[in-house]
Amino acid sequence: MSTYKTKNPLGSAAVKDLYDNAENVDKFVNDRTKEELEDRLGVLRKTWHGMEMIFSRFIDYITGRGEQAVAAIGWQELGNWAVGLALDNRQQIVYYNGSWYKYLGELEHVIAGDSPENDGGVWSAENPTGKWSNIGDAALRSNLGSGEAGLGVNLVYGALKQVSITNFMSSDEIQLLENRVHAVNIDNAITAAKAAGHEHVNLPYGHFGLHDTDDLSNFLVYGSNKTHLPDIKLKTRDGSSGALSLETEGTVLHLTGAAAANGITLSNSGSGYASSLCGIVGCSIYYPEQDWKDWELGTTADIDGDIYYQPTVFPPAFIADKAMRVVFDNVFFINAYHWIDIKDAQLVHFGGIAGSLLNRGYTVTRMGAGGVTENFDSYPYWTWACDFAGISQRVNHYCDAVAKGIQVGLDDGVTRTVEQMRIIHASIIGAADGIICGGKGVSIVDAKIDNVMRGITINDDDNSAYHQIGKAWVSSYYRNNYIPKQRKDGNVYGFKSNTAPPIDLSGLQVVRADGRGVWMPYSSGSQVKGAVVQQCMYKAFEFGSRGRTTDVISVNGCYAGMYNDTSLTDQVAYTFGDFMRCDIKGLQWKGASNVTPYVLNNALNYYEAGKELDLTSLDGRFYKGYSNTLFTQERGLRGFINTSGASSTAAVETLRLSGTNTGAKMLNTGLGIRNTVSDGTGYGALILYASLAGTATPIVEVFGDGVNTGLRPLTDASRDLGDATHRFRRGYFSESLAVGGNPVGVKVAVPATATSVGSVGQWAADTSYLYICVATNTWMRTALETW
């Protein structure tokens, strides 16, 4: 019994877990009173004392029933081992040192040695030429003479729960299994085990064939593989064929016939047993009819226009349909077209699954109560087994163009529910799509996704919402390995969300992005924190879309590292579309002179009622472009510039201030900047905007163009500038009225005397005279006359 019971996963280095481990080892090894104790994870396990007691009871049982079993099988007992004893048929057995031995060599045989070891040797996997076979265990595997329930291994466990598959195999089949002549078919053995009431069956090391078995309802298969990354050996290493060698160690299931053509369904439909658990544990999965040498060149091209070879199409190897609880652990898919489909299940547990991707890893169509993926590892193991030689590259090309690693929320045309898949660890190397998240609440805790076109995609299937993405590492490109290639068509990205409900994205590292890094055209209520995009060749971060009126987003602490190549076009660090509200903080970027750091890709007026774009949290100094022509790189006093391009002559808005009135339309004012010359030598203008009928209109600018400086109006000549009191028109600023070289300006009250208070340029008028101040406190007048 553990003290702390943190239930942290295996491998935890926490002090409490280390204490519990030491405590458990002490009790499990040294306790002499208890046969079972709970481990650190709360699972009831046999103590060393408990295993000793099981073994003792089992030996007592063998002693009491062994002779009866041997007699019932039909062996002809010749008695104790003796030199000179002759054997002339296969039913004859000889007793030596507590076990019965059968002779495997040519008959007739006369014993010449003093033991089986000294008379040709004892057969084993390590000594396949041995002439004698110890059939003591085989006797127990043969129903112990009567077929009565509760015997053999079931006596040890006390119930009809699990048994070795060899209990239902003939001695010849067992011999074939041990000699590795070919995969041994176990369809009949599975049927017999189920008919005998067994819910679990154990498979030892060896190659087993499933041909007619396409349903394992209420059944759990236990292989002997202790890891999800077991052995794989091919018959040849020159890449000419992908055929598996029987020298491959472990428990290997060879799927042919109906098992391959239909897939194997796991379910609890109609179960009359207490256990609702079904699944596959500790097995490698192999399709003898899937060999890259048989693939044919298709008609479909990849994104580079190259045609790829097509594999033999099979349904999923395992289909969980109407399953209450389904488990896959330590399962290795050597060359399955589609590993697993959770078609309809309640609780799903992927302990450790791995293999070579062809078309799909696992897909989830319906999952009512949630699931967990502890370890998912995909890598081209199949072609790696021949060092990617010869035509094995057909597999890698197909996988890179088509394969999907994990797809949660598979659209099968029926509205279904997928609840909470938690992916604790995923390592995906080589695929078109790494992870596709649909349904409700996919949580990625840790993932490495390398050499893929699309790293993580949030789709809109099965009411997709509430996904959490954390600590993901992505490298997105297509088959160009170490030669970057800019891709603008949307086929290549690190992360993309195609659905509006909130997404929590934190700690994402996109270490290479030939296309986009983080792409969220729909992002209502999403949170993006601490995302890093490096070596980006196109757009590092793209948030929102044109024409969206309901989206809100919060972005905090992101970095855009742009690929350094001035020949690239349209490189942008951050792009923002239309938002109702957004909160932006701590954006950093780095790139060459051709990079546009910030762009507002908007089409709507943010300043209508209820639509507010707040970028005031972008603290810091003003940012200026690398040259004066790139005004799309300017950041204004409170926000981004608003632009549709990098033109050096187009007016570029940098700031708007919103006001209200009693009418139906908003009033808009603003400031803008533009180049006044096209050569980028640094001359520009500050533009003042006013609202004309609800539309922000450039009215006047303060400018400099290298020849002139000053203030000039921008509206057409037919429109007055000013009001009824102070009115002037365009053009009055040049060749205006001057007296003594001094321009005539402001109108004042009529002076009483020629020395009344006044300033140069002031003027006045009454019905008789026009008065002009020509010097300080010095007035002149002229009579007004008609002619």
Image (tube, rainbow, N blue to C red):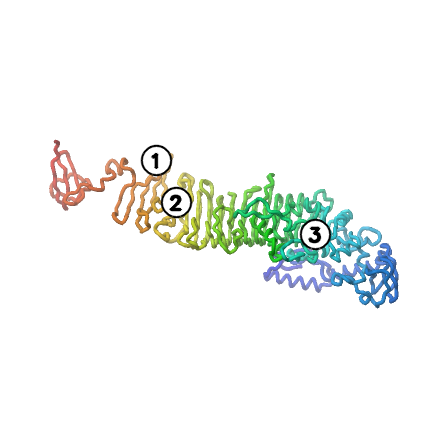
Tell me if mark 1 has few (under 14), some (14-19) or many (20+) residues whose alpha carbon lies within 10 angstroms of its own.
few
Residue type of the residue flagged with mark 2: Thr
Q: Amino acid at mark 3?
A: Leu
Q: Position of residue 443 (x, y in %)?
A: 56, 49
As helix, strand or loop, the secondary structure at mark 3 comes to strand
| Residue type at numbered disc 1 | Ala
Q: SS class of the residue under badge 2? A: loop
Give the image location of residue 386, x and y in percent.
62, 57
Could you say which is closer to the camera, residue 637 or residue 297? 297
- Reply above or below: 105 against 759: below
The secondary element bearing badge 1 is classed as loop
Earlier along the polypeptide chain: callout 1 or callout 2? 2
- Look at mark 2 in the image and give the residue it sits on: 643
**Which comes sooner in the sequence, label 3 or label 2?**
3
Is label 1 or label 3 in front? 3
Look at 70% across and 46% down and name the residue there.
259
Give the Cα distance between marks 1 and 3.
77 Å
Decide: is 321 above or below 4: above
> Measured from the top left, where is residue 438 in percent x and y?
57, 45
Report the front residue among 775 and 751. Answer: 775
Q: Earlier in the sequence, mark 1 or mark 3?
A: 3
Q: Disc 3 marks which residue?
A: 253
Neighbourhood count class around disc 2 (C-alpha, 10 Å): few under 14, some 14–19, many 20 upward: many
Image quadrant of residue 237? Answer: bottom right
Q: CA distance from mark 1 to mark 2?
A: 22 Å
**Position of 62 compared to 538: left or right?**
right
Alpha carbon distance from label 3 to label 2:
61 Å
Q: Tell me, yes or no, if residue 550 can be seen here.
A: yes
The residue pinned by badge 1 equals 693
Q: Nearer the viewer, residue 137 or 647?
A: 647
Q: Residue at x 55, y 46 (%)?
A: 301
**Label 3: few (<14), some or many (≥20) within 10 Å?**
many
